Structure formats: structure tokens, C-alpha cells
Amino acid sequence: MYPPTARTTPNRSRDKMSYDRVAAHAVLDEAYHCALGFTVDGQPRVLPTLHVRIGDTLYLHGSTGSRPLLAARGDGLPVCVTVTLLDGLVYARSQFHHSANYRSVVALGTAHLVTDEREKSAMLTALVEKVGAGRSADSRPPTRRELAETAVLALPLREVSVRTRAGGVREDDADLHLPHWAGVLPLRLTAGPPEPATGVTAPLPAYLRQPRTPWHDPATMAGEHVRLEPLDLAHADELHTATADEEVWRHLGVALPGTPAGTAEVVAAALAAQHRGERVPWVQRCAVTGAVVGTTSYYEIDPERRSVAIGHTFLGRPWWRTGINTEAKLLLLTRAFDELDVVRVAWHTDIRNQRSQAAIERLGATREGVLRMHRQRSDGSWRDTVQYAMTVDEWPTAQLRLRERLRRTAPVA
């Protein structure tokens, strides 16, 4: 526990206060930024900055030319650091009782400029590790010049208080009859799909990937003809080169991209759908040459009903009617039926796409019907969709036929 002081003891709402060390550390560690308050030349200042906690010291990141860092030389700078995590908005029947659920920390004390290079390096490493475990080993460390241009403040955690509000609506009994909605809207900070910088070819690091169930995990799969790997924006240029053919895109939901940047937008849309849990996209590589030749996905992922669909597939024209598409579907079907324990795999294709319908039927799927005006084509017209499916009872026979067909197909060199 942090001992309460006159400066950390509130005059009201004492039931919301705590001096618990573990709770304070949890809030400081979860938050990525804080507000640094101080006084310079008699004027109050509050600056947002990055922070990291190491033990019982809070480190604050800054520039060597900033006012608080210059003022912290010598005897140090009296500061007040605040961190707040907003957990929800509370709606009451009366306006007076509207509130918020939150966890906050206030730390008071005198911050000193860190001059020891080893301490400064340790702080910067911890700050990088905070945004991604393993990131410090996955990036270039600072040079001596960069260290000299970076200032760090150290604040011993001694006067610390925690303030929280949790739970539901608190309102007067006299208002309970009012016909207004009341309740809590939970809030949370969530990461969006990572957006690589221009020229980045490295795959997405593991610490930036969303935690996934087996159903949503694009596990790498390999055979004699094709290798399926998690789709990444780094594949966009090769994918564009392999599939830049009007015939490849004729029956897809988007028009043929005219540039690699356009294909990158298609890939980004697939990754955004993956981030939302709606799709699991793979890139298809030729197992012999290693070239990127196409992409395919799971979608309509339904663990409760134990079903999944295979689609969003397009393959470069030179690899049509080779073993690549057949083996890719065999790998996806094997994962679905044998690993995920699905009972049904579905396919959907444009009623105009006779080639796709024939390919699905060769897999052993059964045509179930036509969904009229089911999806919109890239030209704005509405397509009728032919639906196929394979059930777990049909899988053993279909698997034997697919393996026999692949046995007679030589890998593409």
C-alpha cells in the first residue's frame, strides 16, 4: 500500500479511493500515455507524454529541449502525473446521475532528469517492450546521438492514489418510474488492423497479430503443389503480377486492379475482414517455385453450427487446371473436417461462372440451390449465386477422389 498523505486524501467520494500498490501499477501499465502537470515561471502546464513503470519508478519520455525537462535539472521538478482508463459511460434516468466508469491514478512528487545512460537505455527498452513484447529485439536500438537527443524524467512512486468507479447506474428512488433508458455503455480500447509503412516487406510480427481461435487462425499448410500461408500486405505486388488478367477477375466482387496499389487495397480489405473475425485469408504459393500465384479464404465462419465456407479465391491464369487449386482445396477441407471438426463446408459462386461451378463439382460438393439477387457485381448488377456444400458424411469419399486426382498430377515447375 502507498501511505495516504494530505495531498492524496480526498475531501469527498472517499469510497472511490484506494492506495493499493498493485491496483496503481496495473493502471499505469495498461495505459499508454499520461498527463504531466507542472509549473514553469509561475504558469501551469499540462503535457501529454509516454510513460513506462519500472519497479516503483515512473519514467516519462520527452525531448531535451522541452520546458519540463529543462526545469527538472538540478533539484528536480515538482509534478503531478495523471492516468485515466475510461471503461464505460453510465446513462441514468436523470441527467444529474449520468457518470462514467473509470480507473485512474494520480502520482505526486519531484521528478529528476535521468543522466545515467544505462538507466536511460533501460527505460527506452522497457517503453518499446510495452508496445510489443519482443519489439526491442525486432528493431534497431538508439544510437548515442539519439540517446543524447532524448530526455527522460524519473518520478519515484511514493504519493500515489487510485480512484475508480465501476458497476451500474446509481440514482434516486424517485426517478425509477421515469420512462427513460438507463444503463451502461462499456468502452474499451481496441487495436485496428496494422498498417505497414511504404516499402515494408517484413511479415507482420506475432505481437501485432490478434489472438485467434483455431477457427480464425490462418495456419500454414503445405503439399506437393501448393503452400498456403497467412495473407499479408507484403504479398500484394507479387499477387498483382500473378493475377493481372481480366479473365481472372471476371466473376469476382471487385474489378481488376490496374496497379499493385489497387491489389494492395483488395488485400487490405481481406485483412480488415480477418480483423473483424469474418474471414481467414491465405496466399497461395507454388510449392515448386515459391511464387505467389493466388489467394483463398475461409468465410461465414460459424463454430457454433460447425460450418465454414471456402471462397474469395482467385488464381493466376497460368496455374489454372493444375494441381494447385485442387490441393489448396484439399488442404482447406482437411483442416475443416479433420482439425476443426466441421460438419459442413459451403461454396458460393456466380451463376455465370461455369468454370468455377465445374471446379467445385469436381471437388465432390453438391449443388444445393440458387440464391437470387444475392450479391452485387463490380459493375453494379445483381448476381444470382449458386450454393454448393459438402457434409462430413461426404468427406471421406471426396477426400479419396481428390488424393487420387493429385497423384496423377505432376507439380508445376
Image (cartoon, grey):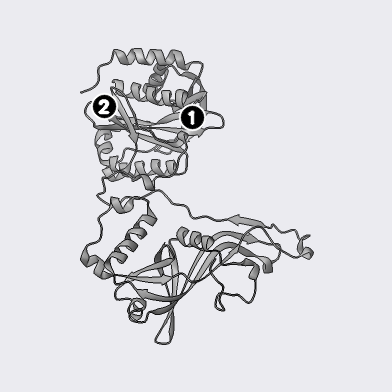
Mark 2 Cα shell of 10 Å, populated few (<14), some (14-19), many (≥20): some
**Vertical arrangement, residue 229 with respect to residue 84, above or below:** above
Mark 1 Cα shell of 10 Å, populated few (<14), some (14-19), many (≥20): many
**Vertical arrangement, residue 324 with respect to residue 404, above or below:** below
Instruction: Give the number of the disc on residue 53.
Output: none
| The quarter of the displayed image where residue 269 is located | top left
Q: Earlier in the sequence, mark 1 or mark 2?
A: 2
Residue 63 is situated, as x and y percent measured from the top left of the image, at 31, 71
Badge 1 amino acid: Val
Q: Name the residue tied to disc 2.
A: 287
In which quadrant is the N terminus drawn?
Answer: bottom right
Q: Nearer the viewer, mark 1 or mark 2?
A: 2
Residue 43 is situated, as x and y percent measured from the top left of the image, at 43, 85
Residue 14 is situated, as x and y percent measured from the top left of the image, at 64, 70
| The quarter of the displayed image where residue 163 is located | bottom right
Question: Which is nearer the eye, 54 or 367?
Answer: 54
In which quadrant is the C terminus drawn?
Answer: top left
Badge 2 amino acid: Ala
Residue 73 is situated, as x and y percent measured from the top left of the image, at 33, 79
Residue visible at 39% across and 56% down in the picture: 130
Question: Which structural element holds mark 1?
Answer: strand
Q: Name the residue tied to disc 1.
A: 308
| C-alpha distance separating marks 1 and 2 | 25 Å
